[in-house]
Amino acid sequence: VFGGAADSTLPNDLHCYDLDSQIWSTVTPAPESQIPSGRLFHAAAVIGDAMYIFGGTIDNNVRSGDTYRFQFSSYPKCTLHDDFGKFLQNRQFCDVQFIVGTEEVKISAHIAMIVARSQFLRSKILAARDARNLHFEKLFGTTDVPLAEQPILEVQLPDAQSEAFEIVLNYIYTDRIVFKDPFSHKLVLIMMDVYQLAVQFNIPRLEQLCVQYLEFKISKSNVLDALYNADRMGLTLIKDYCLGFIVKEDHFYNIVMSAEFAALDKPLIVEIIRKRLNPSKNTTDMKYDKTIGTTLESDMAVFLKSGGKEFCDINLVLEEKIIPAHKSILAARCTYFQAMFRSFMPADNTVNIQIGDISPSLEAFDSLLRYIYYGDTKMPPEDSLYLFQAPCFYGFANNRLQAFCKHNLENNITYDNVLQILEASDKMNVLDIKNYALKMVVHNFSQVAKLPKMQDLSRELLLDVIMAIADMKVENKQRIHDTFISQYNDI
């Protein structure tokens, strides 16, 4: 769905509804796209693998005659959110347990996911870890206790509601709000609890989603309950919205004549009357602002680059270099690591990295980690060659990474990087790409020969280049000969 009118504006967002998950999402076009301006009364149709948009009314009631085409991606979909969501549901390799509410409901989770997305919960986990280390120091005289002998870390959240916390937890893993019972009459009250936790945990984007949901769901039949709970919980934004909703001309009479209004606390009745008598006072605006807060992808990117080092619990070794990582994230995204951690985890928490029989370069493995942690597919072509077989070896949910690698190799080999591609394809024994690279070297030899990388090629590859040049000369001679014979026969 593209465009349309929303709150007196004409947004140019493109929305997609997943029939399987029953979830709406906003589609982000490629950066180089020419995105049409917001409009309404336009025509739109999907034909084949593209969506066409024609005409419509744009700003100042101007009629447009433009036609736009949006090409759907032919790549397999990104499974980042689904992978983390399934991992939470399975509750494998959990290393933290939240003790929630006065009933002390125990809810298990994974430290790496939690600390990547909430600074409040991160500080709670660090405090609990410090307290546990202090206990170990008193009990054993050291904090260096084997991992297998450590009890699971416990974090107390006495003020939280367990059902609301489960919803927040699912959002942390997936960027989605999922209800156990989507038709429950208590959803508005549950979402107010979720909103309160989102504020407490400092998750602004979840706050915005809660506000958007409440604005949609609050009605004449439930607004007094919402007002009462917002007042009780100290949720000023929602309370002000409820007051503004109640005193609207179309709502006021029906609401104040209800039995629920008569049973309302006296101070709230007074506030409603005062609000009604002072209609000029601005009503709180609860509009959704998609620029506020961070996404799962952006949080995981920061976590990989800088924010997650003190929570690493596995060492990956490549070219004698130790690369710290997080078991839960690796296991959530790769069946290879999931099986390893479940069945034969090395005692020293160290794993040597390979892709089949090949050890990738450090740069290529860095690209692989970016894909694992936050679904990034941007990488130089030489990395794509190393990672072409990674989806099969590591057991990703689909071949999305492989499809991007193939596209990257087919469209981005130039004389500037052809020697790196040649070297990598030889090492990986990918003959088609190696032969393609050799032909490019030959056809651009005057430029390629001047590259510093040329001096670093192995003796075997240099011989391959010489043989390719010789083959080209033979082909050229044969072509000249055939042309001459053809012209002679014509005479």
Image: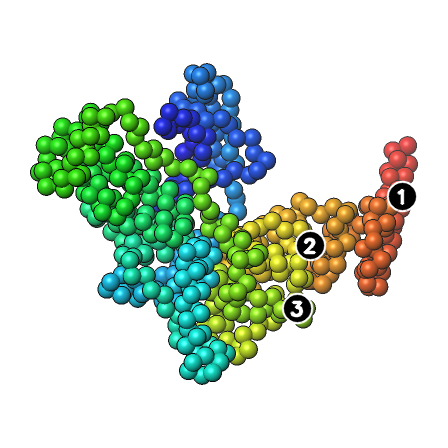
Q: Is residue 280 left or right of residue 175?
A: left
Image position, residue 4 (x, y; %): 39, 27
Labels 2, 1: front one? 2
Mark 1 or mark 3: whose residue is earlier in sequence: 3
Q: Mark 3 sits on what residue?
A: 321
Q: Mark 2 sits on what residue?
A: 382
> How many residues crowd around disc 1 within 10 Å: few (fewer than 14), some, or many (20 or more)?
few
For the residue pair 387 and 230, the one nearer the viewer reads as 230
- At horizontal 36% and vertical 56% (from top left) the residue drawn is 169
For the residue pair 473 and 139, the one nearer the viewer reads as 139
Kindly identify the amino acid type of the residue bearing the numbered disc 3.
Lys
- At horizontal 50% and vertical 59% (from top left) the residue drawn is 396
As drawn, the label of residue 481 is: 1
Labels 2, 3: front one? 3
Q: CA distance from mark 1 to mark 3?
A: 56 Å
Q: CA distance from mark 2 to mark 3?
A: 20 Å
As drawn, the label of residue 11 is: none
Marks 2 and 1 in Cβ contact (< 8 Å): no
Kindly identify the amino acid type of the residue bearing the numbered disc 2.
Glu
Q: CA distance from mark 2 to mark 1?
A: 38 Å
Q: Mark 3 falls on what kind of element?
A: strand
